[in-house]
Image (spheres, rainbow, N blue to C red):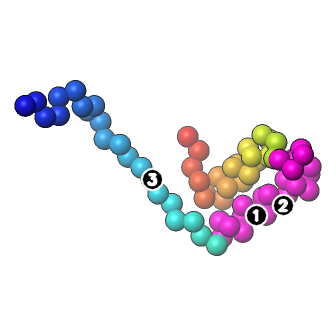
Amino acid sequence: MNRGKGLAAFEVWREFTKWTNEMDERILNSMIDEALVGDKVDSSWITQAYNNIVNNLHQYGFIGLS
């Protein structure tokens, strides 16, 4: 029996982040800012709004960008 034969020779690594009240506040404020500048069409966020929200979270160190 060849156990392990054909298995990939790498380890899967995951990073987990605990969501905080500060993160809630920051994402909600970002969403409000995007709504105020009109980055919604038919009650849906436009792509630029998502990008701006992610960049805002990244700016405050809440998420990493790959």
At numbered mark 3, what does the secondary structure look like: helix, strand or loop? loop
Give the magenta part as a residue range. Answer: 22-44
Q: Quadrant of residue 3?
A: top left
Contact (CB < 8 A) between labels 2 and 1?
Answer: yes
Where is residue 12 drawn, in percent x and y? Answer: 35, 43
Is residue 29 rendered magenta in the image?
yes
Q: Is residue 19 left or right of residue 24?
A: left
- Give whichever of discs 2 and 3 has the lower sequence position: 3
Which is nearer the N-term, disc 1 or disc 3? 3
Q: Kindly identify which numbered label has been placed on residue 28.
A: 1
Q: Along the line of sight, which residue is nearer the eye, 49 or 6?
A: 6
Label 2 sits on a secondary structure element that is helix
Residue wearing tag 2:
32
Q: Single out the residue that lies furthest toward the bottom.
A: 21
Q: Position of residue 66 (x, y in %)?
A: 55, 40
Image point (42%, 49%), residue name: 14
Residue drawn at x 79%, y 63% is 29
Q: Residue furthest front?
A: 1
The tag on residue 15 is 3
Asked if residue 28 lies left or right of residue 32, the reply is left
Is residue 59 in sight in this rendering? no
Q: Relative to the observer, which residue lies in front, 56 or 12? A: 12
Q: Amino acid at mark 2?
A: Ile
